[in-house]
Image (cartoon, rainbow, N blue to C red):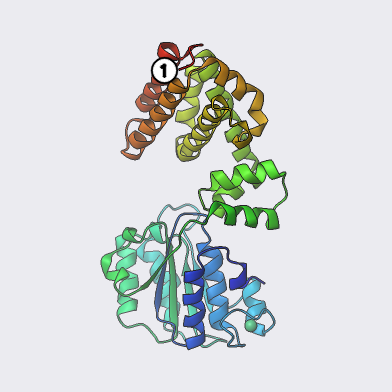
Amino acid sequence: MLTFDDIYGNSHLKERLIRTVKSGNALNSYIFEGADGIGKKTTADIFAAALLCESGSGSPCGKCDACIKCASHNHPDIIYINKKKDKTTIGIDDVREQVMETVYVKPLLAERKIFIISDGDALTPGAQNGLLKILEEPPSYAVFITMVPKAAMLLDTVLSRSVRFTFLPLEQSEVYRYFSEHTEGSDEQLQFASRFSQGIIGRGLLLLEDESFSELYKKTVSLTELLLSKGSGIGDFERFLIENKEKLDFIIDFMMIFLRDCILSSLNMSEQILCRDKLYEIKNIAASVSKKALVGAADNVLRYQKRIAQNANTSAAALELLLSIREEMNDKGNRSQV
Ligand SMILES: [Zn+2]
């Protein structure tokens, strides 16, 4: 069973949680704030198990009855509140049904009853006000753990009655250590995934374990390569960006990694290249396109990222990006090493 020792990074946060468990004075509401894939759910499970564990050691012992039930997600005093399958939000009806009806019933086996809400950002204001009513006069045994990418997504009134834990991205070396201890893959793949993770283990895991994700990488890189080397494929690239608009964040990062690799290659720093599967293509681009044009292309990608963040029209922004990169290639690029 996982314990606090299995959490990589964020040691300040682990220590605070262990102290809380040992003190026996857990409060009624905790907010876990941090990017998807950063370890909030794992930590919430460990924290919940530690609170219910009979050993009193501060971390789950893995041996007592409570721990065994927690490990299989079968402890009757841990209640998971999730979005219903056909819904995008958690509304007041869900809170009534899943929280209000049970929160005032004493825990069955343990001293505490724990409610874990993993999609806190899906809570409607109505649902949050429902929770707030409970938090205003909570039964002493109740503990809520609510997870959100950013705490500001919750009402101030909820935040003010909660203790906040902010999960920070890990060092790249720490992510690499996690991958080398928990996943299989060549050193090159692990290096790439660690860089791509941006300090978020779950993000890198997508690349290592999710087939559709490595497809997304391959497609992005081959379209980028075509655009940089021949200035072609704009129609396909535009369609790809529009069809995958939910994943633009990842696509943009793949493009940036590829462009960075081309720049490294033109600086004769090939040993630092991350897209090792594209060494040959990267060398060719570095030989035919100037550094200045590559840097200009990277700037265009960053501008595109900003526009997307400001909710620009997906199609117009995509076309503008691709045309501007082609222009860089034509104007300053070809065969004139600057
Ligand atoms: Zn235990």
* Rendered position, 312 above or below 290: below
- Looking at the image, is 337 positioned above or below residue 210? above
Q: Quadrant of residue 268?
A: top right
Q: Measuring 42% from the left and 14% from the top, which residue is drawn there?
A: 332
Q: Quadrant of the N terminus?
A: bottom right
Looking at the image, which residue is at 53% across and 81% down? 51
Of 97 and 147, nearer the camera is 147
| Horizontal side of residue 7 vs 299, given as left or right | right
Ligand 1's quadrant: bottom right
- x and y percent of residue 290 in the render? 48, 18
Task: Return the x and y of residue 111 as percentages of the image width and height.
Answer: 51, 88
Q: Residue furthest left?
A: 157
Name the quadrant containing residue 27: bottom left
Asked whether 153 or 265 is in front, the reply is 265
Q: Residue 178, image x and y in percent?
A: 63, 57
Which residue is pictured at 49% across the width and 84% down the height?
112
Under mark 1, the amino acid is Glu
Q: Residues within 10 Å of mark 1 (few under 14, many from 20)?
A: many
Does the beta carbon of the residue at mark 1 sit less than 8 Å from ligand 1?
A: no
- Name the image quarter holding the C terminus: top left
- At horizontal 54% and vertical 16% (from top left) the residue drawn is 229
Q: How many marks?
A: 1
Q: Nearer the viewer, residue 75 or 50?
A: 50
Answer left or right for 120 relative to 133: right
Q: Which residue is mark 1?
A: 328
Q: Secondary structure at mark 1?
A: helix
Q: Position of residue 187 (x, y in %)?
A: 70, 45
Above-or-below relation of 141 to 334: below
